[in-house]
Image (tube, rainbow, N blue to C red):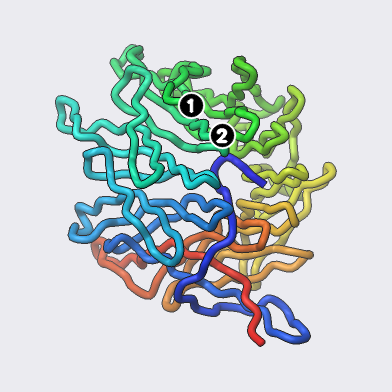
Amino acid sequence: MRRFALLVGGLVLAAAVAVTASGGTTQAEARWVITDLGTLGGPESEPVAINERGQIVGWSDIKGRPRSQRISHAFLWQNGKMRDLGTLGGTYSRAQGINDRGQIVGESATKTKDKYGNQFQHAFLWQNGHMRDIGTLGGENSGARAINERGQIAGWSETKEKDKYGVQLQHAFLWENGRMRDLGAGLGGEILAVAINERSQMTWDSQTPDGGEPWRAFLWQNGKKINLGVLPDMNKSISSVAAINDRGQIVGESGGFHEHHGFLWENGKMKDLGTLPGRTKSSAYAINERGQIVGWSYRAFLWQNGKMTDLGTLPGGKTSGAVAINERGQVVGHSGPHAFLWQKGKMTDLGTLPGGKESGAIAINERGQILGWSETGAAVRSGSSKARLRHAVLWTLRRDS
């Protein structure tokens, strides 16, 4: 299973803490173990993606900065250690994706600044210990969001063209073999949610130049740009893409603020996934190669064979949301304040790091290893109150004899 951003795989564990049981066994007790991935010396870290080799990327606060001036750098976590990937000469960087070859993409501040002193931001490719600036489409800023196994990079870039307010317009790009290809904008404004699969199909969202409605989802394939359209009968209808699988099936949501539904787009048509009974909203967040879709309709759902199933909540919870699914049909997400794993009709509480109150899962691999975040027992003062710190974490099922 290879999808545009949250690529998942096996890991070598470092120090770990057992948090919850996952059902009885005959010869060994199965339990979930949570691993704190740590930080780059600062207070917090944020996970983004993990590949089949067990390499994790994201960003983390660096040490030596006060809370009001915190700066984050992209990181690579492997074999129990977190590595600072550095920057393109500026103060910050963020990793956004990694493939199984260990190639990492994201964006970083550069040495160059505008007339107001703001650093320009450029998309980067990190490989073999070196961060490479892959440039822009003529504008000042760009960002890379995903990379496939062929080394093709999907992202956005400002162009030389400006809107009526003097703001540079953004286009989607495909970078390969050292060249950045301009794929256009769609509606001519801001670009978001860029994704790519192994067939070189790219998706993105585009907004009108004036920053208003509508948002539209676009697909680029075989040299052509396709507007995915919207679901009918939706007030102030927009469309936004969340994920694409290697079969070219796309999921997301379409509608307005008061009513929107998850959709499945395939073979040129957008299908309404509906909602759970009595609800007016749903959003599809992930799809596997079997066409199983998970998302949110006030509670987590699994959609397959034309039917939406309510996955329920953790005990005491009122709401839940599913964000990822693997080929075995294992689903992860959050319910109330905690991350969960849903499998075979049962939802398991994955818990938190010691002292933490909240956690969330973002990805699961074919071996059932789960990537996410958790609050820690530490907190920092924010105004008149204290805020708990968050770290990137990994949950792994372990059997104790």
- Which residue is under mark 1? 176
Q: How crowded is mark 2: few (under 14 residues within 10 Å), some or many (20 or more)?
A: some
Identify whether 344 is placed above or below 197.
below
Task: Decide which of 351, 259 is in the foreground and name it.
Answer: 351
Whole-percent x, y for residue 318 in the image? 63, 63
Write down the quadrant of residue 397 in the picture: bottom right
* Horizontal arrangement in the rendering, residue 352 relative to residue 42 (left or right): right
Q: Residues within 10 Å of mark 1 (few under 14, many from 20)?
A: some
Could you tell me how far apart the alpha carbons at marks 2 and 1 are, in whole angstroms? 9 Å
Whole-percent x, y for residue 100 in the image? 55, 47
Report the amino acid beneath label 2.
Arg
- Which residue is under mark 2? 150
Q: Which residue is depicted at the point 71% across and 25% down?
A: 232
Give the number of the disc on residue 66.
none
Mark 2 element type:
loop
Residue lying at the far right of the rendered structure: 305
Looking at the rendered structure, the number of numbered marks drawn on it comes to 2
Mark 1 element type:
strand
Task: Decide which of 59, 162 is in the foreground and name it.
Answer: 59
Is there a contact, CB below 8 Å, between mark 2 and mark 1? yes
Identify whether 282 is placed above or below 267.
below
* Horizontal arrangement in the rendering, residue 300 relative to residue 307 (left or right): left
Report the amino acid beneath label 1.
Glu
Badge 2 or badge 1: first in the primary sequence = 2
The quadrant in which the C terminus is found is bottom right
